Image (cartoon, coloured by chain):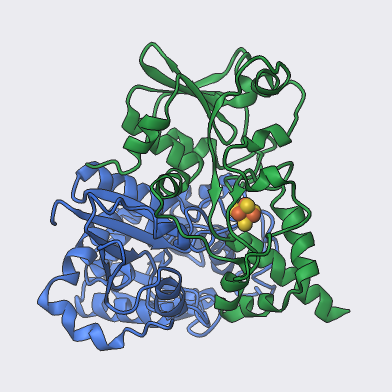
Chain colours: A blue, B green
């Protein structure tokens, strides 16, 4: 990186979930510590600093180029419409009136290193489970109007499957088939590892997915009988919800179930964010240029 | 690593100053931060890393999440000691994200403001409807949501529209003046910093770095949407 390059990590953030921005802030602090960039800042759609504030975050004297890395799982409404509009980006690169050049990178979840990170996380959460006797489930939201996370989860599952390491590798969704609540029908192996393909932990990973998996002790419904609204108990977020990651393995239907925190909380995300910025200037990136649509 | 806001911060630094509800004091060459109402309070819990500010700023005194960091509900009971200017800058950035950079841009004449109507017209998806809000409704919603006593401690620099109409006729003129310390509007009894700064007119007011608002935030846009949706239902 040039000594006058800065990094802006853009994430969604939340007005209700205190854990939403935590991984993004942690990755920024880590990248800042490594001194790869002259400056590292974050901006959020739903928190501060806002995307509009981001325009003023970098000193035009000392920072001449800014890599914008969207901390999102996939391309979608936010990366293609909201971020370009709010940051006043008019293409892959934007020349600002203050002389800065802003470079709009692909979403972090799109990077090929994501596959390795998912494998690492799956291995860490189920250290004693032999992968040959283990099914790996990559979970995304599904029917999400704003992100194509279902497609991204499918892509990652396919990539890991071709490695032939795990007995089975499947993508599963919360709200569309293949449903994560059907995990016992979807898998046959004695061990099952579930990794949520989300940027941060929140209600989905603390409450909804555990409920759909049937591992929430406070919701003692029989497995497979869950029909309730995923939106229920929205107000009920407590920090104790991280407990759900501390009781692996769960035993259900004679199988061992290992449940990991959202992939975006992995420290390895910091490496991928840096790589995503580095990739911008590389040959490989140019293939994708035409997919970018900036709506002004 | 460069610290873009550091020079501005340095020039604004006095031995004690307010930044929102934070009182910053320079004691024996180090920086000591606390809630401005906690200056004389004993038994404060001491922290020593700039990153501690992330958690300190996350919840209010009742443990509720603070979606708007510039809301006047910073938690009490802590003291943050930092040795270096870079750490001070980082901590202040966690407490009030982006506000130092915006202050610097304003000081150097590079800040541009965006009128509310322009922000609303730019919205897409579920927020597009917010643009239908009437001028009267804006007066009320901004007057209530942005007010310093209970809403937000920022100084509003943006206008309602391109014509330069004041953002809300229901807010006092001080709300638009960066020279005014917005915490004075709180008038909270027991706040010694407030008392010192206001009660004794012979004492010069404590220096303040204003929290500037150059464009309506997304929370205000969401409020405007709520008002419009409420009207639709009637
Ligand atoms: S618009 Fe500005 S002043 Fe009003 S609440 Fe949002 S940040 Fe505060």
Choose top left, top right, bottom left or bottom right for residue B136. Answer: bottom right
Q: Is residue B135 left or right of residue B89?
A: right
Q: Is residue B228 above or below residue A264?
A: below
Choose top left, top right, bottom left or bottom right for residue A296. Answer: bottom left
Q: Residue furthest bottom?
A: A290
Query: What is the number of callouts on the image?
Result: 0
Counting from the top left corner in percent of width and height, residue A291 is at 30, 87
Counting from the top left corner in percent of width and height, residue A15 is at 60, 57
Q: Quadrant of the N terminus of chain B?
A: top left
Q: State the residue at coordinates (69%, 73%).
A: A228
> Which of B222/A209 is in front?
B222
Q: Residue furthest left?
A: A283
Ligand 1 in which quarter: bottom right
Q: Residue furthest front?
A: B163
Q: State the residue at coordinates (71%, 16%).
A: B200
> Which of A204/B44 is in front?
B44
> Which of A50/A110 is in front?
A50
Q: Quadrant of the C terminus of chain B?
A: bottom right
Q: State the residue at coordinates (34%, 78%).
A: A90
Choose top left, top right, bottom left or bottom right for residue B7. Answer: top left
> Which of A258/B75 is in front?
B75
Q: Is residue B214 left or right of residue A22?
A: right
- The answer to whether residue A260 is seen in the rendering is no
Q: Is residue A79 left or right of residue A1?
A: right
Counting from the top left corner in percent of width and height, residue A284 is at 13, 78
Counting from the top left corner in percent of width and height, residue A91 is at 30, 79
Q: Is residue A207 left or right of residue A295?
A: right
Q: Is residue A284 above or below residue A101?
A: below
């Amino acid at each position: 990186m040039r000594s006058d390059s800065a990094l802006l990590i853009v994430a969604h953030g939340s007005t209700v979930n205190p854990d939403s921005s935590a991984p993004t802030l942690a990755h920024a602090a880590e990248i800042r510590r490594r001194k790869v960039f002259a400056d590292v800042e974050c901006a959020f759609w739903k928190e501060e600093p806002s995307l509009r504030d981001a325009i003023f975050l970098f000193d035009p004297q000392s920072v001449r180029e800014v890599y914008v890395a969207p901390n999102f799982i996939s391309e979608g409404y936010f990366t293609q419409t909201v971020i370009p509009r709010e940051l006043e980006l008019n293409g892959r690169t934007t020349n600002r009136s203050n002389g800065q050049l802003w470079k709009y990178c692909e979403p972090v979840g799109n990077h090929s290193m994501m596959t390795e990170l998912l494998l690492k996380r799956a291995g860490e959460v189920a250290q004693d489970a032999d992968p040959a006797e283990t099914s790996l489930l990559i979970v995304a939201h599904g029917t999400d109007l704003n992100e194509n996370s279902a497609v991204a989860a499918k892509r990652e599952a396919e990539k890991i499957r071709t490695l032939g390491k795990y007995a089975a590798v499947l993508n599963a969704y919360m709200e569309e088939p293949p449903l994560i609540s059907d995990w016992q029908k979807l898998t046959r192996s004695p061990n099952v590892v579930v990794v949520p393909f989300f940027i941060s932990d929140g209600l989905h990973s603390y409450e909804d997915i555990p409920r759909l998996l049937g591992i929430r002790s406070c919701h003692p419904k029989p497995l497979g009988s869950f029909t309730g609204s995923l939106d229920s108990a929205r107000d009920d977020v407590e920090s104790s919800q991280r407990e759900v990651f501390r009781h692996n393995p769960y035993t259900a239907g004679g199988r061992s179930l290992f449940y990991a925190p959202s992939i975006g909380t992995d420290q390895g995300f910091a490496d991928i964010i840096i790589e995503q910025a580095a990739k911008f200037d590389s040959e490989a990136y140019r293939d994708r240029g035409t997919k970018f649509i900036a709506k002004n | 690593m460069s610290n873009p806001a550091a020079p501005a911060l340095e020039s604004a630094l006095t031995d004690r100053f307010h930044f929102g509800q934070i009182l910053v004091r320079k004691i024996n060459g180090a920086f000591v931060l606390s809630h401005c109402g906690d200056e004389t309070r004993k038994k404060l819990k001491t922290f020593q890393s700039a990153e501690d500010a992330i958690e300190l700023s996350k919840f209010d005194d009742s443990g509720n999440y603070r979606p708007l960091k510039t809301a006047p509900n910073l938690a009490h009971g802590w003291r943050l000691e930092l040795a270096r200017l870079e750490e001070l800058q980082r901590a202040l950035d966690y407490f009030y994200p982006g506000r130092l950079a915006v202050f610097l841009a304003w000081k150097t004449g590079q800040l541009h403001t965006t009128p509310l109507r322009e922000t609303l017209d730019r919205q897409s998806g579920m927020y597009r409807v917010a643009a239908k809000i009437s001028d009267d409704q804006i007066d009320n919603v901004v007057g209530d949501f942005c007010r310093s006593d209970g809403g937000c401690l920022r100084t509003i620099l943006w206008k309602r529209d391109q014509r330069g109409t004041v953002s809300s006729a229901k807010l006092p003129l001080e709300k638009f003046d960066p020279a005014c310390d917005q915490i004075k509007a709180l008038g909270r009894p027991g706040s010694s910093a407030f008392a010192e700064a206001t009660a004794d007119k012979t004492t010069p007011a404590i220096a303040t770095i204003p929290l500037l608002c150059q464009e309506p935030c997304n929370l205000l846009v969401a409020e405007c949407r709520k008002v419009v949706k409420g009207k639709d239902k009637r």
